[in-house]
Amino acid sequence: MSADNKLAEWAAAFLASYDDPAATATTAATGPDAQYPGVTSAAAALLRTVDAGGVPAFVTSNLKQIASDNGVVVSEQWTPNEIVDAIRKKVK
């Protein structure tokens, strides 16, 4: 899968959270999210994108929401990398 496709998949997960916030609260056990058990689908999509080299440039409300949905309390001083690392620690 190309980097552009991975970015598009990641962006789609963020947009889906606006349409159906409950969709991001579901932990996936199969499919592409199986690589990241224990986190929401949106978090899994984020981690796939980061693993492909797509680290977020700045902290967004979506990034904070994904963190919150996965039990991560974000400090105002945290960088995107710190948030991603905290989400990654939730993977079982």
Image (cartoon, rainbow, N blue to C red):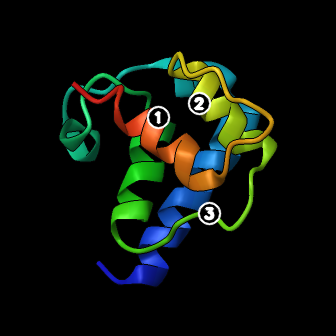
Q: Please state if 28 lies on the left or on the right of 92 as rendered.
A: right
Q: Which residue is mark 1?
A: 86
The amino acid type, in three-letter code, at marker 1 is Ala
Marks 2 and 3, how far apart at CA:
13 Å
Q: What residue is drawn where x is 75% and y is 37%?
A: 18
Q: Secondary structure at mark 3?
A: loop
Which corner quadrant holds the N terminus?
bottom left
Q: Nearer the viewer, mark 1 or mark 2?
A: 1
Q: Which residue is mark 2?
A: 67
Q: Nearer the viewer, mark 3 or mark 1?
A: 1
The amino acid type, in three-letter code, at marker 2 is Ala
Marks 1 and 2, how far apart at CA:
8 Å
Q: Which residue is mark 3?
A: 56
Q: 10 Å neighbourhood of mark 2: few (<14), some, or many (≥20)?
A: many
Q: What residue is drawn where x is 48% and y is 61%?
A: 9
Residue 49, image x and y in percent?
43, 63
Q: What residue is drawn where x is 67% and y is 43%?
A: 63
Residue 38, image x and y in percent?
30, 22
